[in-house]
Image (tube, rainbow, N blue to C red):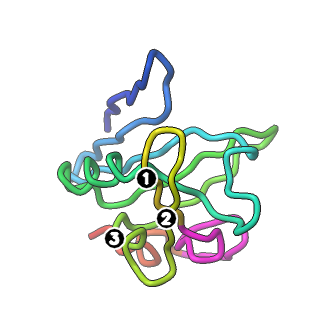
Amino acid sequence: MFFERHIVNGVLVGRWYHMDDGRVVYLAQRTPRSAHRRRAAWGFELALLKMCLDKKVSAIGVAVSRKKPVFYLTRVEDFFGDHSFWEWGDRGRVRFLPMGRWRVSPHRKTGKIEQEVRLR
């Protein structure tokens, strides 16, 4: 496994992780303040989501910086489904997915992550 850094304006915002079996996962680094407060959701810029679709990314996630890191993980296609919503942000159009709709989150108890996300 190796990773590729995603840097925007000189700031590390995430990484693409390339697995040995060919799958790619994008993991963004966020702080708790980055979440959409009113709707309790995590968001990504539409340009990044399209980039992930072009790179054939299997899953997209958020690593929340705290004393003990918290992770959210889902498929990229979920950001274009019925439960997602969009707003205009600082860097353009942003698509959000409510925290309760993520396939792997600290609020859900999952036994097998690959089965939940269906990375295959």
**Crowding at mark 2 (Cα within 10 Å: few <14, some 14-19, many 20+):** some
Q: Nearer the viewer, residue 1 or 100?
A: 100
Say which quadrant the C terminus sits in: bottom left
Disc 3/disc 1 C-alpha distance (Å):
16 Å
Residue located 56% across and 50% down the image: 62
Q: Main secondary structure of the magenta part?
A: loop
Q: Marks 1 and 2: CB-CB under 8 Å? A: yes
Residue 86: which numbered mark, if any? Answer: 2
Disc 1/disc 2 C-alpha distance (Å):
7 Å
Which residue in the protein does label 3 denote?
77
Q: Marks 3 and 1: CB-CB under 8 Å? A: no
Counting residues from the start of the chain, the first of labels 3 and 2 encountered is 3
Query: Height in image: 17 above or below 83?
Result: above
Q: Residue furthest top?
A: 10
Counting residues from the start of the chain, the first of labels 1 and 2 encountered is 2
Q: Amino acid at mark 3?
A: Glu
Q: Which residues are magenta?
A: 97-111
